[in-house]
Amino acid sequence: MDERVDRRNFIGSLGVAATVAATACVAAPRAAGAVAKPKGKIPTTPFKVGHMTFQTGPGAALGAPALKGHTLAADEINAEGGFLGARKIVTITADEAAGVDGNVKELRRMKLSEGIDWFTGVISAGDTVALAPVAEELEIPTIFTDGCTDHLFDVVVKKPKYVFRVTNILSSDAVSCMVAASRTWPNIKRIAHIHPDYNFGRVQFVHSKIAAEKLYPGSEIVSEGWPKLFAGDYTAHITKAIASKPDLLVTSLWGGDYVSFYKQALRFGMYDNMKVIANIGFGIEPGALGKDHPEGILAGAHANYHFTYPPGNEWPLNKQFVERYHKRWNEYPNYAAEGAYTTLYLLKYAIEKANDLLGTWPEPSQIITMLEGMVMATPAGYLYIRPEDHSGFKPTVVGFSKNVPEYPFPIWDPDRIIVQDVRNVSAPPDWPKPGDGHDDPSATYNWIKTTWPTRSI
């Protein structure tokens, strides 16, 4: 814990190669028309999926692409006849903008009145925390496509039976960005923060902070800004940060809030005076960013996906997905679109694997067994569902913003993309959770505090 190492050796010890754990099942999308032959008699009744996401309000910046990704996957699977070629997907949608209480009521209604077979979606971390216990209580098989606060499986549902999630935990955004920053800008001393004032922003802040304590020893936080979600006006927070004269600004503003923030920050010349990390700046629908977006920003995309990575010449699954999505919607997918798309295919392959083993249509518990420990090749790369807590893990990917002739908006600089093994920025499954011998905000926070060496200057 007190061991001090030089920066090069420490960063090298974290690694940058993406690896995948060995598990029971590896799946990948098939070529069109290559439909698995089902075994036994398969019912033809529709398979009802409840899909909740933001359809209205500011949250639709992420919710609308998520619904588009879900719809694209459902239509592709239904074109093959549905699950196992027989059960077509019928989607019952709900607008997440109803708020936490309204969303809990809607989940109950979907199960008790609509009789959904599976529940998917959800953008907000606060909503997954509220909905997961209800899903477990009503035995609703669930795959959250976002809302990935560490708190969900660290505290709220420590041993989930019915609830899964396909995206990396929030702490990995903050930690992977800070590791990437330390490799690029080693001499940071003064750090400012601007985060949305709710659970998501607090998670990003504390994990950026603990990582910086190890990676930038002796650094200090010189300014904190906590704007309300969807505030729109960030002038006071920007001027406060500039006045503190930081070397580095860290922000986890997202969606339309991030767009408003960077445009306002440009007017104050903020990017001329400091380095900037935007933990999920590239998580938004790509076309929402303009050519005026500053170059050289270290930008994360949450859940690791940006439509330019993995590049199509190296990973055909992404090329195919981007082409299909763009042809259908005339825009490029973001991480929320890819997560929702992947979720239905994850369910599809679990059903097919269970059918192959059982010779009949599987029960929900049998599908769940197939999901636990599954590895699937997705447009974003390999997705691993950790059996201990049903949490999805992918390599973390961050990059530096750059304008290129091919697109009217910035993308990751192809020569400056940093890929890290997610296991190097998140606690192992058996690490003590909050309340189990420590009161830190998350297992990952405690793991970093306890095991990471402090970099020597």
Image (spheres, rainbow, N blue to C red):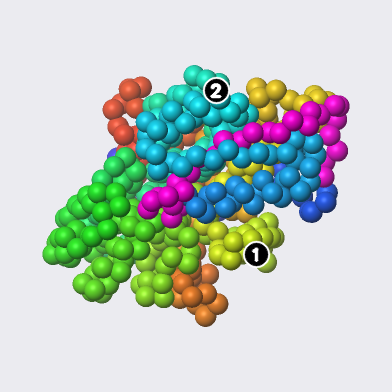
Q: Earlier in the sequence, mark 2 or mark 1?
A: 2
Residue 344, image x, y percentages: 64, 42
Q: Is residue 28 left or right of residue 279?
A: right
Q: Is residue 218 magenta?
A: no
Task: Look at the image and give the residue range highlighted in magenta.
Answer: 35-62
Q: Looking at the picture, tell me which residue is in the foreground, 218 or 312.
A: 312
**Is residue 291 depicted above or below 103 in this figure?**
below
Asked whether residue 12 appears in the rendered view, the answer is: no
Residue 159, image x, y percentages: 49, 23
Q: CA distance from mark 2 to mark 1?
A: 37 Å
Q: Looking at the picture, tell me which residue is in the foreground, 243 or 275.
A: 243
Q: Are marks 2 and 1 in contact (CB under 8 Å)?
A: no
Q: Which residue is mark 2?
A: 112
Residue 241, quarter of picture: bottom left
Residue 77, image x, y percentages: 72, 45
Identify the residue at horizontal 57%, vertical 35% (top origin). 50
Label 2: state its secondary structure.
helix
Q: Looking at the picture, tell me which residue is in the foreground, 349 or 140.
A: 140
Q: Is residue 12 left or right of residue 203?
A: right
Identify the residue at horizontal 37%, vertical 31% (top origin). 101
Label 1: state its secondary structure.
helix
Q: Is residue 394 left or right of residue 288?
A: right
Q: Which residue is mark 1?
A: 327
